[in-house]
Amino acid sequence: MFLPRRTFLRAAGVSLALPWLEASAPARGPAASPPRRMVCICTPLSLHPANFFPEKGGKDYALTPYLEVLKDYRNDFTVMTGLAHPEIDNSHDSIFSF
């Protein structure tokens, strides 16, 4: 398939301008809150649950050894449990249900 040079250059120019347009958006519009992010980590064989998951739920849970490292960011993340799939055992294959 043949792509004309002008078409290629026009598309390249637009793709180079997109990050600039996104970066300038807050300057043009009203101040918005930062976007929320979600990070999920699947570590079926390299995490000791007793050292990661708090024993007591709620906002004032006691930090576990793994979470102690993140104590300065405690109000910025949530630890969730009980997300296991009943048909998948703890093995390398559990990554497929993630």
Image (cartoon, rainbow, N blue to C red):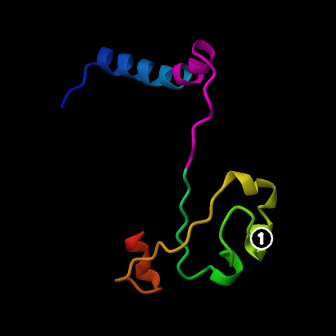
Would you place residue 48 above or below residue 83 in this image? below
Q: Which residue is mark 1?
A: 63
Q: Is residue 48 visible?
A: no
Of the 4 image quadrants, the one containing the C terminus is bottom left
Q: Nearer the viewer, residue 56 or 5?
A: 56
Query: Which region of the structure is painted magenta?
Result: 21-37
Q: Is residue 13 left or right of residue 2?
A: right
Would you place residue 91 above or below residue 27 in this image? below
Q: Residue furthest left?
A: 1
* Residue 2: percent from left, percent from top: 20, 27
* Residue 89: percent from left, percent from top: 42, 86
* Residue 4: percent from left, percent from top: 26, 19
Residue at the spot 36% in from the left edge and 21% down from the top edge:
11
Of the 4 image quadrants, the one containing the N terminus is top left
Residue type indicated by callout 1: Leu
Q: Nearer the viewer, residue 80 or 61?
A: 61
Q: Quadrant of residue 59 in the image? A: bottom right
Q: Quadrant of residue 30 in the image? A: top right
The kind of secondary structure element at disc 1 is loop
Q: Is residue 79 magenta?
A: no
